[in-house]
Structure formats: structure tokens, C-alpha cells
Image (cartoon, coloured by chain):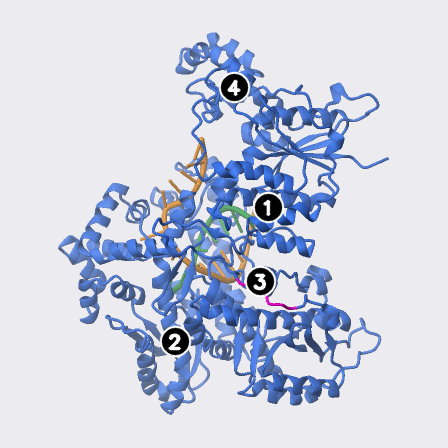
Chain colours: A blue, B green, C orange
DNA sequence: ACACTCACG
DNA sequence: GACGTACGTGAGTGTT
């Protein structure tokens, strides 16, 4: 018995329309638009990749529309009559779809006078009669009528069970079965035709009945069972618009029913057996990929595996007629003539003699890529397990130092003594003359400092180089949320070297079965660890050359690279928190929450999980019948702060209680509890980890724990800040840039009134209120403040209206006034957007680029989102550059001033936190303020002063 | 893994 | 025909 056959039918024509609207306007080297073709190609690739999977295709064919005429036109002359012409840059892609299909050596069905839908239906029926399963690759709602059919009534002789039809939407990666149809239309697939006939379809110009949409149609059909029953029931309905429409529209509905009916008896030009899919021959596919510049796919083809990625070297179509430079994708370099990564070429260094040999070679090479392997992701707790080095392609080794010792190994494998190894490595790692390159080398710096007392310098970092060249565009095409924001080593190796690295998961497993790296057998450990160093070495060679070409040298060398050891030092310092104070707070919060919980359950009349927005929404709006429940796209009521505040204002006591409950549980779980757990047992302090590539704008981000979002806005929240304390005899000092983003906006947009106000130390929101409304009071100042921030974030009349609680057109009037008073702001926004549209990136005053690949998207929401981000990025990013420059200069400046005991602990975007002896406060404050105020100099001379606010005290809260 | 909510600048 | 309205983050909880 052979396994069940599974036929995939690809609705090619429908696919390219969707791909066209979803993908950026790419062109191939000949200048032909190929965005939709690229989408189509990756979709086929994905399907072919599923070939050997359980539910994957054994047979596959692409079905295309051959001509616009079909039997439906004979039934209804207006069928598809009002369909707009396809966009002009899609038209030349139609023939390319056929080329792409041929390139994959796939059978293609296109019959004159028959629509693709009917061919798909006919093939699907024929296949299930043979007992095959069928997957229709489409999201066309007409085709959903076929889902779930099994051919039971009409099996071929000898076939005992029919197959089953489902659908696959490759864009959403969603399987659509019977349940999904019911969820979407409220009726099962066999009744879907009746629903579609009633509601009609404006795209295909199927008339339906005017005034009946999906909701009404679905209700009519599920109430009556069928279209004819629904139409028959009309005369007995009570007088209503719906009644009239049903009676008058009867003929149209019946005609529509025949139009949506799929023909299942079309002759099949290609036999089902001839659609067998054995694999994709490399030719002519390679030629096709090459000719359209799909190089990333081409690389995959060579590598022989992996699902396709987005193209790395397609040029988005030129947007400007003036021939503005097109935004380039990341990797435009030809790969150097390196041998492919060969994991068997690496050496496992197990004797001091071999280590000496490697160190000598590294000293001669002047450049070594290194990578440490450890027992934990937390560099403040991890133990050193080994270190790898690379000196050239495939010229790499791994030095195990802490393998074995558990029962995984009968005997500990021979290894160089750790102290001896470190003594040998120290001159190399500390030598001014030898560059140490790492991927996120901040981690290795901390490990080697902590575990061996070695201060690694000077360093280069491929992750940060990647970030400085490709912030914003590296994320494109990979799943969001990936660690490193698209600048992780595995992704960089894939994107720039076309190489798939071994992953940590591959080696150590995942979840419960995960083992520490020290228990990985040495041969595997060597392959993994040395590969990482090898890949880092190769990436560095590529990036070193690309950095100046991308105009990223300045920001890398002057802003980010100097910051690496500084941030490593801050993380290592950590900050002391008062565990007892946190525990006490936790206890108080727990008691108050328990009381609130009882009250809330009483008010609700039943116990429920308050922390579940779903259950809470049902209680508030269904059970208690409060009005104004808004359901989002997930069908859930929103219960966020603004909604609960409104309910509380309308006299719903439960809403206020829930708000209070939420605040306290949040403070407890995220802060008081988590912070206690984060105290390092060795140092007694909390050590956050800063990511230098975490935020697209160039800001740092803080994790494990996040110390950049410690409460400050409420009194109860500030209690948590009070638990951040200095050591005995010291104080904490906090220095903030005051209104730095508004100051930068005033400078960059050249707004004389705002610059003048900042120069004379005026209250900036009051000045704005005066300029806009002619008077300053609490109201106008508050409005002005909101508008000022709105400007920084990329304004919209709806957004501003929502914030101010006014209508959009009133908000527009305010925006107009703002622009009129400050025309520089309008120009800034206009020029910034024009530039980003033409070049693809925004730039800070220090040359940091942030890419916006969706700035010219055809999808309005996507495009407008990019526009707002692009307006904000230069301002937020310049502010980030400035504080980074201040940080890099800070400790040397303090040391020079004779203040070596001042420690820099934290950065919170516009604030630096220090710990210092109380006696140093005055002198240190002066140095800190000067360094911060002058941080833009000499590279950039601002036309506004940078104001610094400084405070100090026995806790972080008191320092404000 | 994702949605929701909320903490910060 | 739906979307989605202020920029940038990270974490905890509940649900799937």
C-alpha cells in the first residue's frame, strides 16, 4: 500500500495580485518590476520545501487564468465588467509568472474560456474521487465552497475512501478547513455558495442583492437553510427594507447563485498522474533566479536546503523620476573567494603546545576573531567553558577549558589547564596591537574580565557593524522578535555568507532536554564553537570593507565602538537594591490585591480571573451590561486603561477596583518580585544587560531585568525607585537631559521662537502655548505640550484628536496653527520624508542611518507607520548619539578631574545614574554636567543649549 | 507563539 | 473591503 497522494493546486493568478500588493516594488537588473514574481517564486519554493513533510505535496500543479472570457460572461454580460485594469507595473509580470512556473519544472494548467477556479474545482473533484487529498493554495472565498468535500458519493471503482479538500493561504501560513469557513461566514462550505450569491462581490461584479452584506447573508442562510428557502420566506416577513430587497432582488440572487457555482466537469488537459512532484531540478531554476537577481534564493539552491529568504540584492524600483538613488538592500558585495565553511577543518586544542602555536600565529596575524562558550546566557553568572579563535576562513580552533566533570563523561577529556591557558592568552587579548573581533563582544569582554581578570582590548564587533549599516532593513524578511534584531550571527551568516550555521539548539537541545555546553562532546563542541569564530572572522572582513561604502564608519568608530567597553563596565558595576524594602512592598501589594480581588468578585457576582482580559471583558460588558464595549479584530473586548477609566467615570465601581488591582499586580510581578530574583548572589547587586542593537533608532535597550522602565510616574510606583540605593557612605546621582528631543527638533527644524525660548531658559510648553493660542494658562499649556510631543512622533489629526479629546478637524486646525507659527517644523517633516522616500533611510546629525523599507509601501497603514517612525528617528536617534558620546567620554573626564571613585551605573535614554562618595557630589556634578552638555561637540554645533538637570540622594527616587 | 496590558523615555 | 491612527522599547500574564 502506498501512502495517500496529496495534490496541491496553486491558484497562481489570484496569488500574484496579493503578492503585488504586499511586496515592495522591486525591479530586476533589467529594470522590469518583479516584486510580485519574487513573492510568487518564494511561495513555490516554500511549497517545494514541504515536499517530504507529512502533509506536503506528492503532486502539484499551477492553475492560471488564460483569458478573461468564460461561460459566466454568457450568463451575465457584466460579469467582472467593472474590474479595474491591473496596475501598470504588474502587467509585465504576468508572463514572468509563467516563466517562474516553468523554471520550477511544474505542470501548468491554463485553458481558454474556463476560469482558473473551475479548473481547480474540476481537478480537486477528480482527485478526491481517487482517494487523494487536495490542498488548494489560494485564499479566494469562492473556492472555499470546495473545502471539506470528500467525493464519497462518487468514488472511482476500487477506491474505498475519498480524499479531503482543504485550503492553504501561504501568505498568512494558514490552513483553511471546514471550521475556518464556518468561523468566517457562519455557514459550512456547502452553504457558502448561497451566502455568496446573496452578498455578491463587487470585485467580480456579482450582483447579489443590494443592501445585503456578509452578516445579513449569513444569517438568512443559516436561519432558512438555503437560498431558495430564504427567498421563499420573504413574502411572509414583516414589512421592512430587507423584505422588499429580497423580493425585488430574487432574480439577481438566482443569477448570482449560478455565477458563484463552480464547474467541476471541465476536461482535464493534464492527467493527475502527470502532476507527480519528485523534486525541483536545479535547471532551469538557477538560470531564472540569476536572470532576475534573486541571489539569495540562488544561494539556497546551491546550499541545497532551507526555505527562501527575502532578496538581498534586488533594487527597489526607483521612486523619483529624477533618478534619486535607490535604496539598496544589505549585501551587494560579491563574496570573496573563500572556501565554503568546513567544520571538519577546525582543531580542538587540548595541549599547551598547540595553544602556544595558535597564540603565536594570532600575534603574527594582528587580528583574531574570538568567541567564548559558557554555562549561561547571563555573563554575570556564567562560567567559562571554552574559547574559540579564528585567523582565516576555516582556520579556526576551539580550546575547551571546562568540559566534562558530570556523569555524561566517564572521564574528563584532556584539556589545557585553565589558569595556564589564560596566562598564555592574556598577552594576546590585552595587546594594543592585536584587534579582537567578536559577534556581540561585550559578552566576551565581561566573561573574560570576570572569570580570568583579562581586559580584552581593542575590540571590533560584527553585530554592531551590521547594526550601523543595516538598522531597520536587516529585520526585513525574518520573524520579528529574533534576538539581535536581525543582527544575530546565524542570520548574518545566512544573509551575507549564504551559510547555515550550527545553532546552539542543534548542539545543546532545547527546553528540558537542554544540556550545558560543557557536556557537549568535544568534536561537536569544536564544530560549533570554532564555526562561530570562523563566521565572525569572515563577516568582519566583509563589513570592514562595506562600512565606508555604506557611510557608516563615522557612527561606528565615533559613537558605538567606543561605547562597547563602557557599557560592559556599567553592566558589571550593577546597582544595589534594598531586598528587604522590596520584600516589604511586595507583601503590602499582595495584601491589598487580595482585598481588591474579593471586592471585584463580589461586584461581578462571581469569581473570575481578573488578569484575563477576555474574562474581564465578558464580565464587564456581557454580564454587567456596561456600554461601550469595543471589540478589536480578535473579537475580544478591549479593557485597557482608557476604557476602564471611562467606565469608572460613568460610575462603575468595579472599573476603578480593577485599575488599582492591575497597577498593584503589575508592580509586584514585574518589579518587586522580579527585582529581588535578579539580585546577583555574588555581587549582591542587580546587573542589567544593555543591547546596543536593540532599538532601530540607535537607543540602547535594557533586559534581564529591564532597568529602563522602573516606575516614576505614580507615588506608589516611586516606592520601587526608593529601593535602588548606594553603598554605605555613597549617594546616587542622576543627571538628565532636559527636553532633549524638543531641543533637537528646534535645532534641526530651525524654529527661531523655540530656540530662543530654550536659550533663555523659558518653559517650552508655555512658550508654545503663547505662540499658538496667544495666552498661557493650564489648559493651553497642556494642549501645547501634547502637540509638541505629537510633532516628535509624526502627527495625525486622528491621533492628536484622540489625545486631546477633540474631533479630528479641530485637531487639524491646531496642527495648521502649529505649522503656521513654526513653518520650520513643516519643512523638516516634508524634507525628511522626501529624503527617506528617495534614499530609503533617515539620518541623525551624526550620520546614523535607520532604514525604512516600507516607506513606499502600497499598503497605507504600513506606509504611514513608516512615515511616522521616519519623522521621529532622526530626533530620537540624535539624542541617542549624544548621550552615547557623553557616556564614552565620562569616565576619562572624571578620572582626569581627580574623581576616580565615581561609578556610572545606568542609562535611561536621557538620564545617567552614578554612584559616588558623598564628598564628590559637587565636583562630579560639574564634570558630568559639562560632559553631557558638550557631548555633541566638536562634531556637531547645536544652535540650542543642552540643558542638564542634576540631583542626588540616598536613593534613585531621591536623586530626582 | 501571540495578544493584551502597562512600565519607562 | 479592511485597515488604523503618536515614536521607541521589555516583561508578565493568559490563551492557543
Q: Which residue is mark 1?
A: A42
Q: Which mark is residue A197?
A: 4
Residue A170 image offset from top left, x and y in percent: 59, 41
The reply, left or right, for residue A595 in relation to residue A429 is: left
Answer whether residue A734 is magenta in the image. no
Q: Which mark is residue A496?
A: 3
Q: Which residue is mark 2?
A: A885
Above or below A37: residue A843: below
- Of tags 4 and 1, the one toward the viewer is 1
Q: Is residue A468 visible?
A: yes
Marks 2 & 4, CB-CB < 8 Å contact: no
Query: Which residues fall within the magenta stretch?
Result: A333-338
Q: Are marks 3 and 4 on the same chain?
A: yes
Q: Earlier in the sequence, mark 4 or mark 1?
A: 1
SS under mark 3: helix
Q: Main secondary structure of the magenta part?
A: loop
Question: The numbered mark 1 sits on a residue in which chain?
Answer: A
Marks 1 & 2, CB-CB < 8 Å contact: no
The reply, left or right, for residue A625 in relation to residue A335 is: left
Q: Are marks 1 and 3 on the same chain?
A: yes
Q: Observer-nearest residue: A148 or A290?
A: A290
Alpha carbon distance from label 2 to label 4 = 66 Å
Amino acid at each position: 500500500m502506498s501512502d495517500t497522494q496529496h495534490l496541491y493546486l496553486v491558484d497562481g493568478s489570484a496569488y500574484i495580485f496579493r503578492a503585488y500588493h504586499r511586496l515592495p516594488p522591486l525591479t530586476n537588473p533589467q529594470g522590469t518590476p518583479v516584486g510580485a514574481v519574487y513573492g510568487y517564486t518564494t511561495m513555490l519554493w516554500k511549497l517545494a520545501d514541504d515536499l517530504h513533510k507529512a502533509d506536503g505535496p506528492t503532486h502539484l500543479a499551477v492553475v492560471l487564468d488564460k483569458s478573461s472570457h468564460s461561460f459566466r460572461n454568457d450568463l451575465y454580460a457584466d460579469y467582472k465588467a467593472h474590474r479595474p485594469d491591473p496596475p501598470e507595473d504588474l502587467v509585465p509580470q504576468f508572463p514572468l509568472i509563467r516563466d517562474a512556473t516553468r523554471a520550477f519544472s511544474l505542470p501548468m494548467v491554463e485553458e481558454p474560456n474556463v476560469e482558473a477556479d473551475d479548473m481547480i474545482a474540476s481537478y480537486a473533484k477528480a482527485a478526491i474521487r481517487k482517494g487523494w487529498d487536495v490542498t488548494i493554495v489560494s485564499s479566494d472565498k469562492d473556492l472555499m465552497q470546495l473545502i471539506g468535500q470528500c467525493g464519497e458519493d462518487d468514488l472511482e471503482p476500487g477506491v474505498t475512501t475519498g480524499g479531503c479538500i482543504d485550503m492553504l493561504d501561504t501568505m498568512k501560513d494558514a490552513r483553511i478547513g471546514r471550521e475556518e469557513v464556518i468561523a468566517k461566514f457562519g455557514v459550512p462550505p456547502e452553504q457558502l455558495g448561497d451566502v455568496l450569491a446573496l452578498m455578491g462581490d463587487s470585485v467580480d461584479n456579482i450582483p447579489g442583492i443590494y443592501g445585503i452584506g456578509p452578516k445579513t447573508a449569513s444569517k438568512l442562510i443559516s436561519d432558512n437553510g438555503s437560498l431558495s428557502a430564504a427567498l421563499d420566506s420573504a413574502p411572509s416577513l414583516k414589512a421592512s427594507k430587507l423584505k422588499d430587497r429580497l423580493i425585488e432582488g430574487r432574480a439577481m440572487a438566482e443569477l448570482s447563485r449560478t455565477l458563484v457555482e463552480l464547474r467541476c466537469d471541465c476536461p482535464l488537459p493534464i492527467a493527475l498522474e502527470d502532476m507527480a512532484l519528485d523534486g525541483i531540478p536545479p535547471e532551469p531554476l538557477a538560470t531564472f533566479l540569476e536572470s532576475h537577481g534573486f541571489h539569495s534564493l540562488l544561494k539556497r539552491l546551491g546550499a541545497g536546503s532551507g526555505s527562501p529568504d527575502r532578496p538581498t540584492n534586488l533594487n527597489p524600483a526607483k521612486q523619483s523620476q529624477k533618478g534619486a538613488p535607490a535604496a539598496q538592500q544589505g549585501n551587494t558585495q560579491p563574496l570573496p573567494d573563500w572556501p565554503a565553511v568546513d567544520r571538519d577543518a577546525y582543531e580542538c586544542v587540548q595541549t599547551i603546545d598547540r595553544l602556544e602555536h595558535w597564540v603565536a600565529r594570532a600575534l603574527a596575524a594582528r587580528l583574531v576573531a574570538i568567541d567564548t562558550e559558557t554555562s549561561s546566557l547571563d555573563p554575570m553568572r556564567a562560567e567559562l567553558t571554552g574559547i574559540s579563535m579564528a585567523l582565516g576562513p576555516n582556520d579556526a580552533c576551539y580550546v575547551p577549558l571546562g568540559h566534562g566533570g558530570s556523569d555524561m563523561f566517564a572521564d574528563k577529556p584532556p584539556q589545557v589547564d585553565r589558569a595556564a591557558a589564560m596566562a598564555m592568552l592574556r598577552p594576546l587579548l590585552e595587546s594594543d596591537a592585536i584587534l579582537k573581533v567578536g559577534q556581540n563582544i561585550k559578552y566576551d569582554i565581561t566573561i573574560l574580565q570576570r572569570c580570568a581578570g583579562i581586559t580584552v582590548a581593542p575590540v571590533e564587533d560584527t553585530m554592531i557593524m551590521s547594526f550601523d549599516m543595516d538598522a531597520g532593513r536587516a529585520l526585513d524578511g525574518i520573524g520579528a522578535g529574533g534576538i539581535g534584531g536581525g543582527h544575530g550571527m546565524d542570520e548574518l551568516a545566512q544573509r551575507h555568507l549564504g551559510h547555515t550555521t550550527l545553532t546552539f539548539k542543534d548542539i545543546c537541545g532545547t527546553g528540558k532536554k537542554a544540556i550545558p555546553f560543557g557536556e557537549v562532546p568535544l568534536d561537536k563542541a569544536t564544530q560549533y564553537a570554532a564555526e562561530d569564530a570562523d563566521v565572525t572572522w569572515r563577516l568582519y572582513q566583509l563589513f570592514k570593507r562595506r562600512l565606508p561604502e555604506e557611510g557608516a564608519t563615522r557612527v561606528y568608530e565615533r559613537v558605538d565602538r567606543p561605547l562597547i567597553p563602557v557599557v560592559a563596565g556599567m553592566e558589571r558595576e550593577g546597582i544595589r537594591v534594598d531586598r528587604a524594602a522590596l520584600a516589604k512592598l511586595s507583601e503590602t501589594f499582595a495584601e491589598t490585591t487580595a482585598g481588591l480581588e474579593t471586592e471585584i468578585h463580589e461586584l461581578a457576582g462571581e469569581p473570575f480571573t481578573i488578569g484575563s482580559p477576555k474574562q474581564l471583558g465578558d464580565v464587564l460588558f456581557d454580564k454587567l451590561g456596561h456600554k461601550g464595549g469595543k471589540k478589536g479584530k480578535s473579537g475580544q473586548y478591549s479593557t485597557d486603561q482608557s476604557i476602564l477609566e471611562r467606565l469608572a467615570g460613568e460610575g462603575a465601581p468595579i472599573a476603578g477596583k480593577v485599575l488599582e488591582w492591575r497597577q498593584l499586580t503589575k508592580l509586584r510581578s514585574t518589579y518587586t518580585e522580579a527585582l529581588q530574583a535578579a539580585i546577583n548572589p555574588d555581587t549582591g547587586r542587580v546587573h542589567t544587560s544593555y543591547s546596543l542593537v536593540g532599538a532601530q533608532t540607535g537607543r540602547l535597550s535594557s533586559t534581564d531585568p529591564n532597568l529602563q522602565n522602573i516606575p516614576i510616574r505614580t507615588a506608589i510606583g516611586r516606592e520601587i525607585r526608593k529601593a535602588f540605593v548606594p553603598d554605605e557612605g555613597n549617594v546616587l546621582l542622576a543627571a538628565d537631559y532636559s527636553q532633549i528631543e524638543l531641543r533637537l527638533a528646534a535645532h534641526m527644524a530651525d524654529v527661531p521662537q523655540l530656540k530662543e525660548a530654550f536659550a533663555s531658559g523659558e518653559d517650552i510648553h508655555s512658550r508654545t502655548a503663547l505662540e499658538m493660542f496667544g495666552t498661557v494658562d493650564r489648559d493651553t499649556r497642556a494642549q501645547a505640550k501634547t502637540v509638541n510631543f505629537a510633532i516628535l512622533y509624526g502627527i495625525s489629526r486622528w491621533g492628536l484628536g484622540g489625545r486631546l479629546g477633540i474631533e479630528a478637524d479641530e485637531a487639524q486646525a491646531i496642527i495648521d496653527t502649529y505649522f503656521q507659527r513654526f513653518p520650520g517644523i513643516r519643512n523638516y517633516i516634508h524634507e525628511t520624508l522626501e529624503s527617506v522616500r528617495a534614499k530609503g533611510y533617515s539620518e541623525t546629525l551624526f550620520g546614523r542611518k535607520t532604514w525604512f523599507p516600507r516607506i513606499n509601501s502600497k499598503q497605507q497603514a504600513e506606509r504611514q507607520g513608516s512615515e511616522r517612525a521616519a519623522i521621529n528617528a532622526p530626533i530620537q536617534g540624535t539624542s541617542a548619539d549624544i548621550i552615547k558620546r557623553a557616556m564614552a567620554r565620562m569616565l576619562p573626564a572624571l578620572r582626569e578631574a581627580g574623581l576616580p571613585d565615581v561609578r556610572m551605573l545606568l542609562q535611561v535614554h536621557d538620564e545617567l545614574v552614578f554612584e559616588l562618595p558623598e564628598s564628590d557630589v559637587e565636583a562630579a556634578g560639574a564634570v558630568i554636567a559639562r560632559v553631557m552638555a558638550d557631548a555633541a561637540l566638536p562634531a556637531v554645533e547645536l544652535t540650542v543649549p543642552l540643558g542638564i538637570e542634576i540631583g542626588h540622594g540616598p536613593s534613585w527616587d531621591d536623586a530626582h
